[in-house]
Image: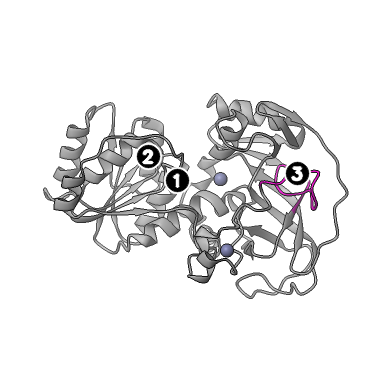
Amino acid sequence: MVMTEPGALEYQEYDVPAPGPGDVIVKVLCSNVCGSELHIWSGEHPKKSGGLGHETVGLVHQLGEGVVTDNAGQELKVGDRIAATYFIACQHCPTCQSGRLNLCENAYSFWAKQPEEYPHFHTTFSTHYFIHPGQFFYKVPDNVPDTLAAGANCALSQVYYGIDQAAVSLGHKVVVQGAGGLGIYATAILKSKGVDVIVIDADPSRLALAAEFGADHVINMNDYKTKQERVAAVRELTNGQGADACIEVAGVPAAFAEGLELVRSGGKFVTMGNVTPGKTIDIDPGFITRQQVMIIPVMRYSPEYLHKALSFLSKNIDRLPFNKMLDAEYSLENVKEALTDSMERKVTRATILLK
Ligand SMILES: [Zn+2]
Ligand SMILES: [Zn+2]
C-alpha cells in the first residue's frame, strides 16, 4: 500500500528483488499502525508520499549472502520468525563510530525512499519487507504472538532504552507522564526494576490499564487540574521530595515544563514523547540549575534493546495483560480504514494482518 499524498492510498505491485549480501527479505505476518503513521497520513510529517508502516514481524523469505545468524548470534534459516529495528545503525558514520548507534546519520536512508526505487519494499504495510545491512534483527521467541512482536521495535524498545538512561533501581520513585502505549510499557519495565511507579494521565481507562500493569499510584488530571496540584500530589507520594526520575511520554510541550518540577533536587528527567520540533514552552533555567535537574533527551534506541524487548515480552507474557494493548485487526485491503479508525480514536492500536 502506497500513500500517493496525505489521505490517499493506492495498491502498487513490484517483483520481490533478490537479496544482496547482508540483506534479509521477510514475508510480513502483521504490521501495526503507530502514531507516526497517523502524522504522515494527516500530512503533519515531512514525508508526504511513499510507503507506510515500520512495526512488523515476518518470516524469513530469503537470506542474503553472509547472513547466517541474527544480531544476537542465533542461527537463522528461511521460515524463522524475526523482528527488525525500523532504522539503520550503519556502524560507519561518525556518530555510530562514537558509539551512539541510536543517532546514526543514515538511520532513515532507506525508509524515506519511494516504492519505485530499488528494493521497493522499504516499509511494512506490504506483503514483503526488505531488511538492509545495519538494521538489527532478532528471532522472536515462540511464546510471543505476532501482533505484540510487531510493536516491540518501537514503543517497548524505546521506553526500555530511555528508562535505562536514567539508571533507576530498586526502591526509586518514578513518575510516568502519559499512559498511552509508551506509558503502559514504561510502567511494566519500571515495575520489573522494583521501582515505585506514579502514572499521570487524563484518561481514566488508560490509568486503569496502567494500574493493571503495576502502577502503584495514578494521578487523574481531571481530579488534579493544575500543574501545582499535580506537583503537590507527587510530593505527597515521595515523602515531600519529588520523584527520583520522571519519564515523559506524553508528547506535549506542557508535560516537559511540568516534568522538570515533578523530580526531586538532583533528579532525572527523561524526555521521549516530544519529538516534533517547533513547538515551544516557557521554562525557568534558574529553577533547573538550582534544582540541578538532569534532563535526558532520548531519540530512538540502541539496537540491542529490540532483543531485550522481545525477551521481556517472552518472560512476562503470562503475567501482564499485553493482549489489552491491541484492539483491532485489519487486512491489507483495509489499511485506509485502519488509519481513519485510529485517527478518529475509534481503536487504540490497530494491526494489519497479512494472509
Ligand atoms: Zn512506531
Ligand atoms: Zn551510522
Which of the 4 image quarters holds residue 13? Answer: top right
Q: Which residues are magenta?
A: 112-129
Q: Determine whether the residue tagged by mark 3 lies in a helix, strand or loop.
A: loop
Reading the image, the residue beneath label 1 is: 182
Q: Is residue 214 visible?
A: yes
How far is disc 3 from disc 2 in space, using C-alphas?
31 Å
Instruction: Give me the residue at 48% from left, 65% from top.
Output: 100
- In this view, the residue farthest toward the left is 240
Task: Tell which of 248 and 234 is nearer to you.
Answer: 248
164 with respect to 294 (left or right): right
Residue 286 in the image: state x and y as whole percent.
16, 46
- In this view, the residue farthest toward the front is 94
Q: Tag 3: residue type?
A: Ser
Residue 245 in the image: state x and y as whole percent.
27, 53
Q: Tag 2: residue type?
A: Gly
Q: What's the mark number on residue 126?
A: 3
245 with respect to 159 (left or right): left
Which of the 4 image quarters holds residue 69? Answer: bottom right
Magenta-colored stretch includes residue 327: no
Most frequent secondary structure within the magenta stretch:
loop
Badge 1 local density, few (<14 within 10 Å), some, or many (20+)?
Answer: many
Q: Earlier in the sequence, mark 3 or mark 2?
A: 3
Q: Tag 1: residue type?
A: Leu
Instruction: Give me the residue at 65% from left, 74% from top.
Output: 74
Reading the image, the residue beneath label 2 is: 178
Q: Earlier in the sequence, mark 1 or mark 3?
A: 3
Q: Determine whether the residue tagged by mark 2 lies in a helix, strand or loop.
A: loop
Residue 195 in the image: state x and y as whole percent.
29, 57
| Cβ atoms at labels 2 and 1 below 8 Å apart | yes
71 with respect to 190 (left or right): right
Instruction: Give me the residue at 36% from left, 37% from top.
Output: 207
255 with respect to 126 (left or right): left
